[in-house]
Amino acid sequence: MIIDDFPSIQWTNIVICDPVLCAVRRAQLDNRGVTLWCATFDVAGTGDPCDGEIVSATRLAHAGKKRLAEFFAGRRLARVALAHAGHTETWLARSSSGAPIWPSGFSGSLSHKRNVVTVMLGPSSLRLGVDVEEPFTGFSLDAISRRALSKTERQSAGDSPFGRALCTTILFSAKEALYKALSPEVRVRFGFEAAELNAPPQNGRLTLKLTRTLTPALPAGASFELCYSGLDGRVLTWLSAPRPPKPHRRSSR
């Protein structure tokens, strides 16, 4: 099986005027207001002269050119997505961990690989996570397999009709998307071993299960269904799951 055999996403081309982003596309993922955005950018590009002011405000003054290009491409595409959703904020703030701080009422996630950037946007009532990866090969495949997959998962990847390389890439990408979706609630780093494959990739979906309790709302055994698709020869995975309502605080008198 190859990436071209994956279930496809119905993309719509979006015309914008931006000095960094090209080939902007948008997809409506469900009826809950979740959209997926994709664009390409020039890793070696100079960007916008105004970006220099943002660099100094986001602790990226010493970052390399490639890292800055990725950063601005993600933030610019997020700004485009938010504008289409009716929000006019000019730029996303950056948390101490480096993750974007989404405006009130919104939830989102970013991912980039080489010259491709993706943004997932939806209401704050949802846990959202997106990840894009190029298929692993050779030494990278072996290293990622040992680092991110359990012994059982490595065996499952080896026996998968996708082939070891593609299945390993899907599992790694799914765990990355899950981490992005849950980390705002957990607020501490957790490793790949915190989730394991519960249902193998099939028909554009797979299920991961938590192996340990991360928070009271994220107990061991909780499962999450993720989706996967192809994106110009890359593997794209995402999670869109309801966020539990916040408990009501009792007023003290």
Image: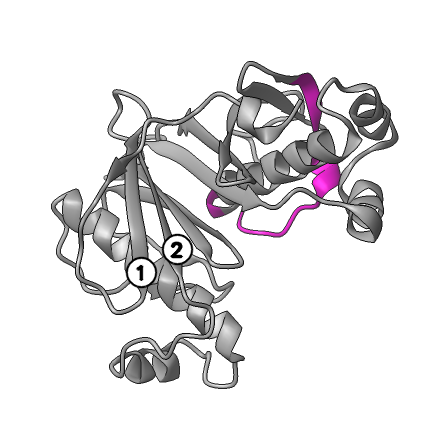
- Residue 139, image x and y in percent? 84, 52
- Residue 186, image x and y in percent? 54, 44
Amino acid at the residue labelled 1: Leu
Q: Is residue 24 above or below residue 178?
A: below
**Residue highlighted by disc 2:** 40
Numbered marks: total: 2
Is residue 26 visible in this depiction of the protein?
yes
- Residue 4, image x and y in percent? 54, 28
Amino acid at the residue labelled 2: Thr
- Residue 43, image x and y in percent? 46, 69
Assess whether residue 149 is covered by the magenta stretch.
Answer: no
**Could you say whether the residue bearing mark 2 is in a helix, strand or loop?**
strand
**Front one among 207 and 237:** 237
Report the quarter where the C terminus lies.
top left
Q: Residue at x 64, y 33 (%)?
A: 170
Magenta region: 184-200
Is residue 214 visible in this depiction of the protein?
no
Q: Residue at x 18, y 55 (%)?
A: 16
**Residue highlighted by disc 1:** 21
Q: Residue at x 76, y 26 (%)?
A: 163
Say which quarter of the image contains residue 20. bottom left
**Could you say whether the residue bearing mark 1 is in a helix, strand or loop?**
strand
Report the quarter where the N terminus lies.
top right
The answer to whether mark 1 and mark 2 are in CB contact below 8 A is yes
In the shown orientation, is residue 201 left or right of residue 224?
A: right
